Amino acid sequence: MAIAQTQADKKSAGMISKDVEGISVFSLGGVDFATGTGAPAAGDMQASPKGSMYLNSAGPDLYCKTSAAGVATVVWEKVSAQ
């Protein structure tokens, strides 16, 4: 399953956000943060740097990107399940 976002997921701190392959994210400290529903798929947020975070608000499950920006295979590690 890939990340899906509603309008509520497209808000960010100070309303400073950017688009990463169709996913609305905000950057803080050199990493990207996003919320949405569904587990991240192999291609989600490919351009985001290693250490970026994604919260599946339907779970809620927290994921950390463990692959570098721009690599062909994007790897997400589940940090926690609530």
Image (cartoon, rainbow, N blue to C red):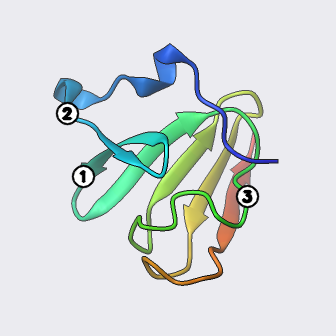
Do the numbered discs 3 and 2 sit on residues whose CB atoms are within 8 Å?
A: no
Q: Give the alpha-carbon distance from disc 3 to disc 1, as whole Å.
A: 22 Å
Judging by the rendered image, the residue that carries numbered circle 3 is: 41
Q: Residue at x 74, y 27 (%)?
A: 58
- Name above or below for residue 42 compared with residue 58: below
Q: Give the alpha-carbon distance from disc 2 to disc 1, as whole Å.
A: 10 Å
Q: Residue at x 49, y 25 (%)?
A: 9
Q: Earlier in the sequence, mark 3 or mark 1?
A: 1
Q: Residue at x 59, y 28 (%)?
A: 5
Q: Earlier in the sequence, mark 3 or mark 2?
A: 2
Give the crowd class for mark 1: few <14, some 14-19, many >=20 residues within 10 Å.
few
- Name above or below for residue 31 compared with residue 28: below
Type of amino acid under label 2: Ile
Say left or right for 12 vs 80.
left
Quadrant (top left/top right/bottom left/bottom right) for the C terminus: top right
Q: Residue at x 77, y 34 (%)?
A: 59
Judging by the rendered image, the residue that carries numbered circle 1 is: 28
Viewer-closest of 55 and 47: 47
Between marks 3 and 1 in the image, the one whose residue lies nearer the viewer: 3
